[in-house]
Amino acid sequence: MLEGTRGITIKPANVRYADSIVSLIKSLPEWFTEDAISSVISDIEAMPGYIALFNDKAVGFVLLDERECCLEIAWIAVDRKFHGKGIGSRLLSQVEDYACMREKPILTVKTYGGDDYEPYLKTIEFYKKNGFKMYEVIEEYKPFNGQPAAILVKHLKCATR
């Protein structure tokens, strides 16, 4: 068992780590489908983000969709061996710094919003633990193939960062 996060580095994400990110996604089938793989590869090339590395292997990553008024978390994942070790929170901290630097004081995220699937209930709790508030649940969200989508929002206090 891992004893914390010593040896974890957070760096800007880039295509050099695409294979490692794909391996990470494949190891988390309860969150990501096979369709996600091709999408994440193109998004790594197009979106800013961060990667958490342990021995030069991705153990977490986050990618951002930059909007006019805010940043949206498009992708976030952490290797299950590192769940509960603060890696996701460290990635979000980097995102918050980036958002403030870009003068985007609002973070948003859309995730599965049904109350019937434990992995995504934990995902929503993770966001809430990190200061996000539930904005809305859309019951039949077309981009989620008609499934419910939870939209969470966090307003940053950038002047104090």
Image: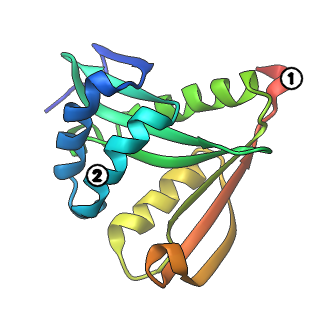
Q: Is residue 94 left or right of residue 106?
A: left
Q: Is residue 65 left or right of residue 13?
A: right
Q: Residue at x 82, y 21 (%)?
A: 160
The C terminus: image quadrant: top right
**Count of labels shown?**
2
Residue type, mark 2 in image: Ser
Farthest residue in the left direction? 1
- Residues tagged 1 and 2 counted as in contact (Cβ below 8 A): no
The picture places residue 93, in percent across and down from the top left corner, at: 57, 29
In front of the other: 66 or 130: 66
Residue 56, located in which quarter of the rendered image?
top left
Query: Which residue in the structure is indicated by mark 1?
Result: 159
Q: Marks 1 and 2, how far apart in space? A: 38 Å
Query: Which residue in the structure is indicated by mark 2?
Result: 38
Residue 34, located in which quarter of the rendered image?
bottom left
In front of the other: 36 or 160: 36
Q: Residue at x 55, y 40 (%)?
A: 64
Q: Earlier in the sequence, mark 1 or mark 2?
A: 2
The picture places residue 144, in percent across and down from the top left corner, at: 46, 74
78 above or below 49? below
The N terminus: image quadrant: top left
